[in-house]
Image (cartoon, grey):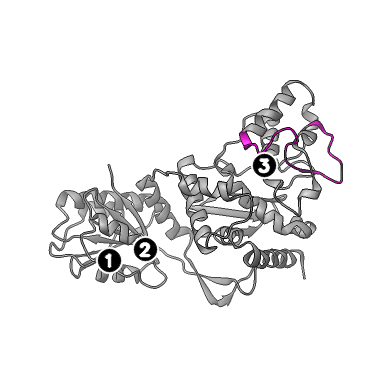
Amino acid sequence: MDVKEEAQQILSDSMLYLYKYEPFYAYMIAQMRIRQSDDMPTLAVGYEGGTIKLVYNPQFMVNNKKIAIDLLRHECGHVLHKHLLMKLPSTVVETQVMNVAMDSVINGNLEQIEPLTSPAEDIITGKAKPSRPYVGPSKDLYNPTTEEVYKHLMELVKKQVVSAKGISIGGSGNSSGNLDDHSMFGNISEAEGAIINKAIVEQAFAKSKGNVPHGISKLIESILKAHTNVNWRQELRKFSGQAIENGRYRTITKPNKKYGYPFFGQRTQYTGEIAVYVDVSGSVSDEDLEKFVGEMHNISKQTGLRLLVVQGDTEVSDVSRYSRNKLKHFVRTACGGTELQPGIDAAAKASRFVVVFTDGYASLPQAPKRTKLMFVLLKDHSKQFAEDAKQIGKVVVMND
């Protein structure tokens, strides 16, 4: 077994343990895009393509197999403490201190790592023992936030209790004793990141049926109760981008290359176009239709691909392929009643990702198998449809 295979087995065993004893963490990690990289010195999490990626060095995982479960818990901790939303400070010393502060608030609850930690103050002052190289909780503060630890440690630095040389641990990716890398933090807007955090935590909480580990319930509650202002254009761009990046679907018929049984494998389905269904029923005015066409133009511009555009009212009235320039010649082909199912079925034959432009004054359709739907609703839309449609896809409202 080579290093990469051994690292995959360690990760698989750790996930099985978490599924059995701490399913909340397992369901969080299962939603992440996990990959190996020799360029990553340790392991790290960051935002990518509307979700979170977890990148790890296979040799680092093998060398630290005794604490592998806690390494996964640690990365989840960064999400729960909202560290991925933070932009690191501009100076080297401030960044190192922030790295220490971030790890400090997480590692105190990790049973495998805890015996290997030293108080955050000792890490900063260079007093940590070689046998306890990792960052532990503050010895001066009780249950502090990341910001409180950072402020406290910076006061030590400003008092010249330590030199910059003494600040060497905490996730910069360049120093001995680092637990993980924080360089991917703060790489998207706070609003976008908050939406991703909430979606991942909501799903993990639901699937684990509220069975959460001790010490993180308040963090989960904070994320779940957070009001996230959804920018519908950002959400539409994100969804359209997925159609290009993630032409894959999970299947039990193919074993997972990284984790083995019982995890599903993936098959890749590359797409050369994005499917759009446009509701051209009588309740959608020509002015509303112009708004739809404008957003289709933006999708085509963003992806650089043609769109397969299906028009329909109670039945499919037209199926055409449009480039960005050709969309200016878009012609309405129907204006009757409303039935979304035929058009969505037609669009789903071309792509796993289907954008549906409608006012929602229709019965709720069924989502075709292995198809992801996004409903883009007019500002004047059916509120009941908007609520019901969340059961089968994403829903955004053109509220401007």
Near-viewer residue (66 or 171): 66
Chief SS of the magenta region? loop
The residue carrying mark 1 is: 364
Mark 1 surroundings: few (<14), some (14-19) or many (≥20) residues within 10 A: some
Q: Relative to 238, is 5 on the left or the right?
A: right
Marked residue nearer the N-terminal end (2 or 1):
1
Q: Is residue 357 visible?
A: no
The numbered dot on residue 105 is: 3
Instruction: Tell whether label 1 touches label 3 (CB within 8 Å).
Output: no
Q: On screen, 323 above or below 262? A: above
Q: Secondary structure at mark 2?
A: loop
Q: Is residue 126 magenta?
A: yes
Sequence-wise, the earlier of marks 3 and 1 is: 3
Indicate the amino acid at tag 3: Val
The answer to whether 384 appears left or right of 234 in the picture is left
Evaluate if marks 2 and 1 touch, with contact meaning CB atoms under 8 Å apart: yes
